[in-house]
Image: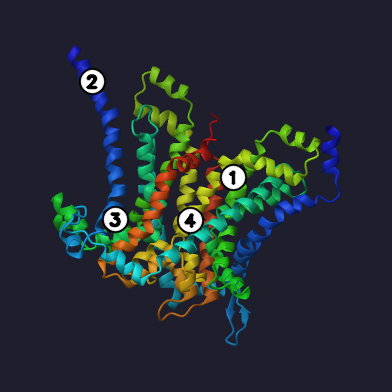
Amino acid sequence: MVNQSSSSAWQRWLTQTVLPHVILFGYTCVALFPIFLVIINSMKERKAIFKAPYLPPLPDTFSLEGYATVIERANFPLYFTNSIVVTVVSLVLILFTGSMAAYALSEYKFPGNTLLGLYMALGIMIPIRLGTVSIMSIVVSMGLMNTLTALILVYTAMGLPLCIFVLQEFMRQVPRDLKDAARVDGASEYRIYWLILPLVSPALATVAVFTMIPIWNDLWFPLILASGESVKTVTLGAQIFLGQFVTDWNAVLASLSLAMIPILILYIIFSRQLIRGLTSGAVK
Amino acid sequence: MEKEITKTSRKPFPTHIIVFIAPAFIIYTVFMVFPLIDSLRLSFFAPDGQGGAVFVGLGNYITLMTDELWSDRFWNALWNNFVFFFINMIVQNPVGLLLAALLSARKLRFRNSYRTMLFTPTMLSVVIIGFIWQLILSPLWGIAKGMMTFIGMEQFFMPWLGLESSALIVLALISVWQFIGIPMMLFYAALLGIPEEMVEAAHVDGANPWQVFWSIKFPLILPSVGIVSILTYVGNFNAFDLIYAVQGGLAGPNYSTDIMGTLFYRTFFGFQLQLGNPTMGATVAGMMFMIILGGVLLYLYGWQRNIQTYEV
């Protein structure tokens, strides 16, 4: 009897404590192993990459020749600058114009309010890519072909629907009394918007995260609208470089690592806020 | 106070509303809504050979679906895209749900570390992920082969990405590997939202964790199941980057990994010997638009209206 209950407790411990860790740890390995493998091998000499791919770089196999090729042959600092400019400027434009529109839609009653809200939300589900044929001719006619401005404008349009939709929800929850009190004090509508903005900053962070990743990682629009050397983003730059250097394993591994490491560092630093942002939208 | 409010709402011309909305409205309209509509309009035209365009009605769509030059590629891409979506749907979402269920268990140690690590691939660019897997699966480097040898299945190793029969499946699995973080997080957030007392009550009644999950938690997160499904659908029918990065614009071998996104790119922009054709490109985009819109409408009217949502 005692034996049986202890064996069932043992079994419970196995299935409810050990098994989840086995599965989670196993999948974590599946998720991280390829990334890890590329990074360690990027710092090894060619022979060691093939002979002992699983070993970390050791004193006698350590080599940065791949990085040297990448630095010599591709302008990664420029690509990074371009990506940062495009992502940051788009993000600022999205958050600024999006929060203004969301404020107006949630705060004022005016004819067509609901319809306008729906109109702005359409773009959440319909991918902007489908309009590429016309986007390209608009960009050409504005003389913006091969400029970062073209990318910024397109990404801003792409990010706005979700931003407005999410922020509207959050702005509705800001207590009315607060705004009315400000109005009594004679604050202008613009001033009130500016006062409300910090109150929805968690939502702004969520939107920023959701919007930033697709912009940084996009290949489509840089490929079509801005493929010139001076305006290449990291994603496009890496894609083209990798295509040209397929056979140079050191260079390929080094460029993959160079494209990943900054993102991984940022991710490690901000992962807590980021994941809180990702889950808060749904939980509230 | 009352007076103040009525005064505001009676203002004859609310300039501030226009100032607030105009910037977003203009950018969104010019770079998103107008191009979508204009692109659909373009799909009803064909070049007349003198630099102009003539209205051809549904001509382009009929060409795309029936003309020998186009129809093979079109039906092939459409079919491949459904296969791609199907694999994503049946692998990514159940595994994502399993991981989320384990992560949301009470008293789980290292929860935050697991969450962070499992989400890492989702942060990275599809192009980078595509190349990494290309290297790992490459017979030259032999990582995949080495792994299979290790578990004694060496004879089953093949250069999967180079074979017509397996390339699409492998690409779909790479896509699953990368994007599993999204369903995982959405399910995880929904599971966290379930009140503790409900689960506690079921435990007291003697239900085991398996029963608690399927009869209490799962019905409560059904709305998330719908959201995840429609996100997967829209994302997959709009996919392009992965195939382009791994297999190039021709979506080889022999078009076996061609999906709507790559077909759209080649048709509109041209690739190698093929010349770009804006109106046919717009037609392919029009098809994608209808497929995606169809899915979204089915979701809004078929799923969202009919599932029971429990207020918790």
Return the residue at label 2: A8
Q: Give the structural element (helix, strand or loop) at label 3.
A: helix
Return the residue at label 4: A214
Return the residue at label 1: A166
Residue A223 located left or right of residue B130: right
Residue A63 at what x, y percent from top left? 23, 61
- Marks 4 and 1 belong to one chain: yes
Q: How many labels does the image show?
A: 4
Q: Specify few, some or many for label 1: CA neighbours under 10 Å numbering under 14, 14-19, or 20 or more.
A: some
Return the residue at label 3: A39
Residue at x 36%, y 22% (from the top left corner): B207
Q: Mark 4 lies on which chain?
A: A
Q: Which of marks 3 and 1 is nearer the N terminus?
A: 3
Q: Give the structural element (helix, strand or loop) at label 2.
A: helix
Q: Specify few, some or many for label 3: CA neighbours under 10 Å numbering under 14, 14-19, or 20 or more.
A: many
What is the quadrant of residue B149 in the picture?
A: bottom left
- Marks 2 and 3 belong to one chain: yes
Q: Earlier in the sequence, mark 3 or mark 4?
A: 3
Q: Specify few, some or many for label 4: CA neighbours under 10 Å numbering under 14, 14-19, or 20 or more.
A: some
Q: State the CA–CA distance, disc 4 to disc 1.
A: 17 Å
